[in-house]
Image (cartoon, rainbow, N blue to C red):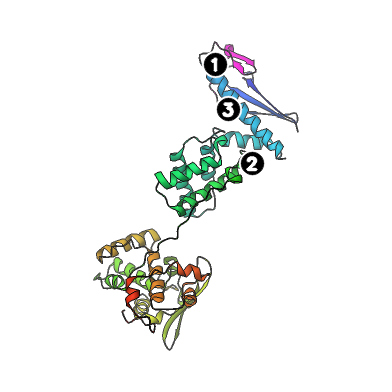
């Protein structure tokens, strides 16, 4: 496949009142011709020389800048074509146009990142937020990273920046490196980066990810929230939803989708059999162990809805209300909806429940996941592990 390109001036050979005309790049693929407009400054005919690398005469006041920019544009186009030929990819006008106008400055990796994120589709909102935050960190680290700068050394410098200057821990650092890796892989796929120039191709950057410290509530803290005098207010409803999660281990999303069909009853009381929305893992929850939880079901029973709790709000708003409740109850911890689930695991395991049993209550796939939710506290040491009852509530 033969591909040639050359700058042309006033390609339609027209006249206009201003006397200023554009410079285009004529691209020919197997004798078929198309034109690209690099959008350089328009010039008068008397300044056009048309000679290799000296397209604009020196008599033009900005000849050096225009010639340099045009030369760089032609160089980027040449590199793109060579890479595609090496990789055995077909070269078409569409591919060239996509490359030329998608890239902005084809040598700047940050612009490719910006374009990649702007065109993401079908992603969850939280994933898009992660990409957006990653981009902010990358631009603060270096707003003009060239494709030629991408290397293992740059990865190590970026890692150092994230952990030292941005103050991120290993988990967050790895999360942003994962996004960087995906984008570099896409740049290779799109022909912007050669395979062996991908910094992750040979990279051995190690990122230590520490185990997260799970926040949970002690029994006294749960009681403090339960005993708040709130009257018939929206805050009272959010408190009840949170307590139900503490006594069932449900995520807020699972609580939102809990239906009356999920509720079962035997001689002991109510229990729930269902599947977690996150991973479809089955769980079984003995609600009857906590009379408060059974009372909450009765309190919010509705004749018109198939949902157990039809009146819920967004996770963000719910977390805001939980922070208010924690402050009112004198709980000096950052309380979010996930704290309820951590507290549930803590309640059971602090009573000596076997881990495989608690895994079934939580809907975990691996028992090791459950272990991460459990933290030994002084209260557990002082309390003898005996028959599992929750008379404290």
Residue 38: image tag: 3
Q: Nearer the viewer, residue 319 or 382?
A: 382
Q: Is residue 91 visible?
A: no
Q: Is residue 381 above or below residue 125?
A: below
Circles 2, 1 touching at the beta carbon (< 8 Å): no
Report how many numbered discs are placed on residues in the image. 3
Q: x%, y% of residue 155?
A: 52, 43
Give the mark nearest the N terminus, 3 or 2: 3
**Whether residue 204 can be seen here:** yes
Query: Dot 2 lies on which element?
Result: helix
Q: Which residues are magenta?
A: 39-59
- Spatial CA distance of label 3 from label 2 is 29 Å
Q: Nearer the viewer, mark 3 or mark 2?
A: 2
State the CA–CA distance, disc 3 to disc 1: 16 Å
Relative to 233, is 82 above or below? Answer: above
- Quadrant of res 25: top right
* 46 is within the stretch colored magenta: yes
SS of the residue at dot 1? helix
Give the numbered dot on residue 249.
Answer: none
Q: Residue drawn at (61%, 17%), measured in percent from left and top? A: 55
Q: Residue furthest front?
A: 381
How far across and how far down the image is residue 73, in percent?
59, 27
Residue ID for mark 2: 196
Q: Position of residue 138 (x, y in %)?
A: 47, 42
Residue 47 x/y as whole percent: 57, 13
Q: Is residue 188 left or right of residue 210?
A: right
Say whether residue 357 is left or right of residue 334: right
Q: Is residue 138 above or below residue 367?
A: above
- For disc 2, the neighbor class at 10 Å (few under 14, some 14 to 19, many from 20) is few
Q: Determine the residue positioned at 51% across, 36% down.
A: 145
Q: Earlier in the sequence, mark 3 or mark 1?
A: 3
Query: Which sits earlier in the primary sequence, circle 2 or circle 1?
Result: 1
């Amino acid at each position: 496949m033969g591909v040639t390109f050359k700058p042309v001036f006033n390609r339609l050979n027209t006249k206009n009142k201003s006397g200023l005309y554009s410079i285009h790049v004529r691209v020919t693929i197997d004798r078929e011709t198309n034109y690209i407009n690099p959008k350089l400054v328009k010039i008068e005919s008397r300044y056009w020389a048309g000679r290799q690398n000296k397209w604009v005469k020196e008599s033009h006041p900005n000849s050096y800048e225009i010639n340099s920019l045009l030369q760089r544009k032609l160089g980027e186009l040449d590199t793109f074509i060579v890479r595609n030929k090496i990789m055995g990819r077909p070269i078409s006008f569409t591919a060239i146009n996509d490359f030329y106008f998608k890239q902005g400055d084809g040598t700047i990796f940050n612009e490719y990142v910006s374009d990649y994120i702007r065109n993401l589709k079908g992603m969850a909102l939280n994933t898009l937020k992660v990409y957006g935050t990653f981009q902010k960190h990358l631009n603060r680290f270096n707003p003009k990273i060239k494709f030629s700068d991408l290397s293992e050394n740059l990865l190590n410098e970026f890692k150092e920046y994230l952990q030292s200057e941005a103050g991120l821990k290993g988990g967050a650092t790895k999360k942003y490196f994962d996004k960087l890796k995906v984008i570099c892989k896409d740049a290779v796929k799109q022909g912007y980066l050669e395979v062996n120039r991908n910094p992750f191709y040979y990279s051995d950057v190690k990122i230590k990810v520490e185990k997260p410290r799970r926040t949970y509530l002690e029994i006294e803290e749960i009681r403090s929230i339960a005993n708040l005098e709130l009257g018939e207010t929206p805050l009272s409803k959010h408190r009840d939803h949170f307590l139900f999660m503490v006594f069932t281990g449900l995520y807020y999303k699972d609580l939102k989708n809990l239906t009356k069909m999920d509720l079962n009853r035997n001689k002991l009381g109510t229990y729930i059999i269902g599947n977690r929305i996150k991973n479809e893992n089955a769980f079984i929850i003995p609600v009857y162990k906590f009379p408060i939880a059974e009372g909450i079901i009765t309190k919010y029973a509705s004749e018109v809805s198939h949902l157990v709790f039809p009146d819920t709000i967004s996770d963000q708003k719910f977390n805001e209300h939980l922070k208010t409740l924690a402050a009112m109850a004198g709980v000096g911890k950052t309380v979010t909806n996930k704290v309820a689930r951590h507290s549930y695991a803590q309640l059971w395991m602090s009573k000596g429940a076997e881990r495989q049993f608690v895994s079934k209550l939580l809907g975990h796939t691996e028992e090791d996941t459950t272990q991460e939710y459990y933290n030994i506290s002084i209260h557990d040491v002082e309390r003898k592990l005996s028959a599992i009852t929750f008379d404290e509530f």
